[in-house]
Image (cartoon, rainbow, N blue to C red):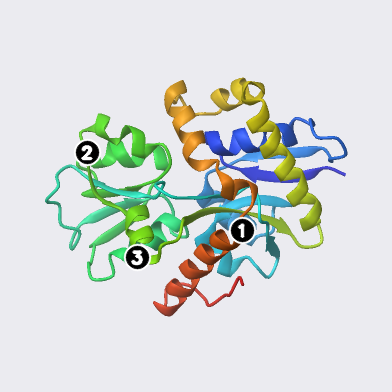
Amino acid sequence: MALSLAVSPCPNDTFVFHALVHGLIPGTPEVNLTFADVDVTNTAAERGEFDLVKVSYAALPWLLDDYELLPAGGALGRGCGPLVLARSAGQELTGATVAVPGDRTTAYLLFRLWAADQRPAKIEVVPFDRIMPGVADGTYDAGLVIHEARFTYQRYGLVALADLGEWWEADTGLPIPLGAILAKRGSADPAEATEWIRKSVSMAWANPAASHDFVLANAQEMEPEVVQQHIDLYVNEFTLDLGRDGLAAADALLQRSAAAGLTPEVKLS
């Protein structure tokens, strides 16, 4: 019986899951792969649409009744947080229109925690690839961006008002929890799925050339050097094993957001 898997087309996900989705790991089932941005998978998971799915840590309070958090395959790290971008360093956020990549993304949750004393006039959910052009042309006063944007935002003439990863790490001492892999209860055995994903990660590291064409084909026109920077930043020790620090980071994020009244209360550890 095939398993359904939904991840983003970003280089970290295609690199991590290449071996699993191409049947290179003995004993694994056939995998039906769907690519979707995380704001799409967050809501699709709430409808129970996939057996294995990549979602935002910020969405977990709405999903853990039906899904179990896996300790492998996700995106956590240091120096890899979302950026708040604008056309000038003096841009005020109070009264501003801010573009964000999704209303249940970790990026937006971090933004709300960071900007608790500021009052943007309007928040607009915008496809990720339209945020930087929209800020550059004045459609939005500021934008919240993730992933490869930290390597490319200067090309749009933009400046970083804040690095929310740096803010989070300085405040907590913990890595930043971005994307989580979940297994649907009753559809995918969590222990087996974790082992498959860890083997897929290990195979990707051992032979990075094997996934090269697959990664580039889905990288949304990113240059190869940016693709490699993306993989190097987001595929790390937490991808292989969430560990104590990773779990503590996710727990801290959700406890803080619940205390601020931004998400339902949930405890991971």
**Residue, disc 2:** 158
245 horizontally vs 122: left or right: right
Give the residue at the far left of this rendering: 90
Residue 256 visible within the image: yes
- Identify whether 209 is placed above or below 261: above
Indicate which disc, 2 or 1, sits on the residue closer to the N terminus. Answer: 2
Disc 1 element: helix
**45 and 114: which is toward the camera:** 114
Question: How dense is the environment of label 2, judged by Cα within 10 Å: few (below 14), some, or many (20 and up)?
Answer: many
Q: Mark 1 is on which residue type?
A: Gly
The residue at the point 57 percent across, 75 percent down is 266
Which quarter of the rendering shows the N terminus?
A: top right
Disc 2 element: loop
**Residue, disc 3:** 171
- Identify whether 225 is placed above or below 157: above
Indicate which disc, 3 or 1, sits on the residue closer to the N terminus. Answer: 3
**Residue, disc 1:** 243
**Residue 104 pos. (x, y %):** 47, 60
135 horizontally vs 111: left or right: left
**Residue 131 pos. (x, y %):** 33, 42
Q: Mark 3 is on which residue type?
A: Asp
**101 and 172: which is toward the camera:** 172
Residue 188 visible within the image: no
Question: How dense is the environment of label 3, judged by Cα within 10 Å: few (below 14), some, or many (20 and up)?
Answer: few
Quarter of the image where one finds residue 115: bottom left
